[in-house]
Image (cartoon, rainbow, N blue to C red):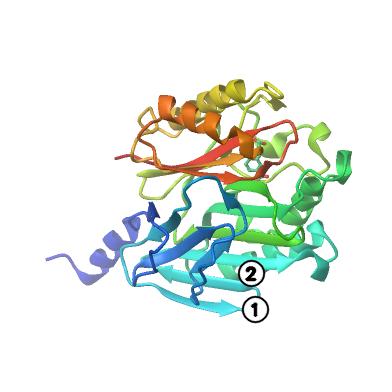
């Protein structure tokens, strides 16, 4: 029989099982082990539960819900603009706020990241693996005055020490709802994951000055601590630091897929996006939905797919893909 202390040590070395991310039909409700449940767009559904978030991005076509399930009972609560849930070593936290209350996109990002970093810092689950950002009119303003660039400055100002050891994987997408609404949510856990970069791309935090005063603070992907899931950041047709194939949807999709393949390889994941790879595709122009679906049907037919109408943070990019790759 192992001694009690040894038992505790061995338990501490075992990473918590990764959350299961699934797309579910629109009638699903949060269960006792649901960490978070997301609806998209103007769904009339409202669920009075801190784990429920209506993401402001409109779906294109089918509008499933996205559910994160963990291996243990979940508790949840609210604290001002922040809501949270935790269970099985995992933490979900979300902030919704309005720019009018914070003087613009930079101030709103400072506020949101301030709340999130202070909350996460005081939690056992303080290792942020993945984060999503949705802001309105993301490409409005020119040069250094583009709203996305102000958001980037506020994000880094609001990030506390909790992000100082390295940035999480992320997505930052423009929505078409109330232009002042900012939504930020994250997934964290009780031990570090492994940050993964893409050898085809310059790391975002090293982007040259032409992309703004404050380079974007995110990693290309995170391998979750159990080593079984790659959490993939928003991935687009960026090669080196430059946008490729301006105005050409098909070529951007093909380049994005090459980036995803490269990321899987550098993350040590098996090649290909199959049924174990729930993906989200952000499409700038609604009229591109059919072409995006046709591309997906040909190149990753079994990957569960959710298409949403969203702007990519560089005006010339038409499409971006993020999601999860389970080792299977
Ligand atoms: C790029 O590769 C595309 O600012 O958090 C992708 C993922 C992009 C995340 C972010 C931005 C972000 O630079 C843009």
Q: Residue 274: horizontal and vertical position, in percent?
A: 35, 34
Q: Residue 293: horizontal and vertical position, in percent?
A: 49, 33
Q: Please tell me the numbered disc located at residue 273.
A: none
Describe residue 198's horizontal placement relative to residue 68 as left or right. Answer: right
Residue labelled with disc 2? 118
- Which is more N-terminal, label 1 or label 2? 1
Image quadrant in which you'd find residue 106: bottom right
Describe residue 99's horizontal placement relative to residue 39 as left or right. Answer: right
Check mark 2 vs ligand 1: CB closer than 8 Å? yes or no: no
- Rendered residue at 78%/32% (across/down): 208
Q: Against 197, is 174 above or below?
A: below
CB atoms at circles 2 and 1 under 8 Å apart?
A: no
Callout 2: few (<14), some (14-19), or many (20+) C-alpha neighbours within 10 Å?
some
Q: Residue 328: horizontal and vertical position, in percent?
A: 29, 40
- Rendered residue at 54%/28% (across/down): 291
Choose between 296 and 197: the one closer to the eye: 296
Q: Is residue 21 visible?
A: yes
Q: Is residue 200 visible?
A: no
Q: Secondary structure at mark 1?
A: loop
Callout 1: few (<14), some (14-19), or many (20+) C-alpha neighbours within 10 Å?
few
Q: Residue 224: horizontal and vertical position, in percent?
A: 42, 48
- Rendered residue at 44%/70% (across/down): 86
Image quadrant in which you'd find residue 304: top left
Describe residue 181's horizontal placement relative to residue 60 as left or right. Answer: right
| Ligand 1's quadrant | top right
Q: Against 99, is 148 above or below?
A: above
Residue labelled with disc 1? 80
């Amino acid at each position: 029989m192992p001694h009690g202390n040894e038992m505790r040590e061995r338990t501490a070395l075992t990473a918590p099982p990764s959350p299961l991310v699934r797309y579910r039909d629109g009638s699903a409700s949060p269960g006792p082990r649901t960490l978070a449940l997301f609806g998209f767009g103007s769904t009339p559904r409202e669920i009075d539960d801190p784990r429920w978030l209506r993401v402001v991005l409109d779906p294109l076509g089918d509008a499933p819900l996205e559910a994160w399930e963990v291996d243990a009972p979940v508790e949840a609560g609210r604290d001002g603009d922040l809501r949270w849930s935790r269970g099985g070593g995992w933490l979900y936290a979300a902030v919704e706020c309005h720019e009018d209350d914070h003087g613009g996109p930079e101030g709103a990002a400072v506020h949101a990241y301030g709340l999130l970093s202070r909350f996460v810092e005081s939690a056992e689950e303080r290792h942020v693996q993945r984060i999503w950002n949705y802001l309105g009119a993301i490409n409005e303003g020119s040069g250094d005055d583009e709203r996305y660039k102000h958001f980037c400055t506020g994000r880094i100002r609001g990030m506390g020490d909790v992000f100082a050891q390295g940035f999480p994987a992320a997505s930052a997408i423009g929505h078409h709802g109330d232009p002042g609404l900012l939504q930020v949510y994250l997934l964290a856990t009780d031990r570090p994951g492994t940050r993964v970069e893409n050898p085809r791309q310059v790391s975002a935090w090293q982007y040259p000055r032409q992309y703004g005063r404050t380079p974007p603070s995110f990693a290309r992907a995170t391998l979750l601590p159990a080593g079984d899931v790659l959490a993939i950041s928003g991935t687009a047709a960026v090669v080196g630091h430059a946008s490729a194939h301006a105005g050409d949807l098909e070529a951007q999709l093909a380049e994005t897929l090459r980036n995803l393949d490269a990321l899987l390889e550098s993350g040590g994941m098996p090649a290909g996006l199959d049924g174990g790879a729930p993906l989200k595709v952000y499409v700038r122009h609604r009229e591109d939905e059919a072409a995006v679906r046709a591309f997906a049907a040909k190149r990753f037919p079994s990957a569960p797919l959710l298409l949403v109408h969203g702007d990519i943070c560089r005006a010339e990019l038409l499409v971006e893909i993020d999601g999860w790759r389970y080792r299977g």
